[in-house]
Image (tube, rainbow, N blue to C red):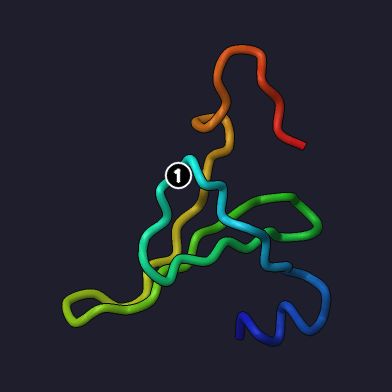
Amino acid sequence: MLGEAIARGHIEEIPVIATMKPGFGEKWFREIETGAIYSLTEPDEKVGPTWRPIDLKDLMKGSETIQ
């Protein structure tokens, strides 16, 4: 399903911001229409893949902006 959304141009993979200390196999994706960003981690033995929203406001310090 993710591959189809990427192929149709609804979602794009973006670089993980280094300050977030990404987990092993973590990838970030942005929904083109809304700009919402999500993290997808590789599945492990105890838990399947994890899909969670990323709040960029939590990453900003002071008057920094994210473009």
Picture quadrant where residue 57 is located: top right
Residue at horizontal 53 percent and vertical 40 percent from the top: 55
Query: Where is residue 44 drawn, in percent x and y?
Result: 25, 78
Horizontal relation, residue 38 to residue 13: left or right: left
Find the residue positioned furthest to the left.
46
Residue 12 shown left or right of residue 42 in the figure: right
Q: Residue furthest top?
A: 62
Foreground of the two, 17 or 56: 17
- Total number of numbered discs in the rendering: 1
Q: Secondary structure at mark 1?
A: helix
Label 1 sits on residue? 20
Residue drawn where x is 66% and y is 20% of the image? 64
**Above or below for 45 versus 30:** below
Three-letter residue code for mark 1: Met
Residue toward you, 26 or 55: 26
Quadrant for the C terminus, please.
top right
User: Seen in the image, is 48 located left or right of residue 27?
Assistant: left
Give the residue displayed 72% in from the left and 68% down from the top: 11
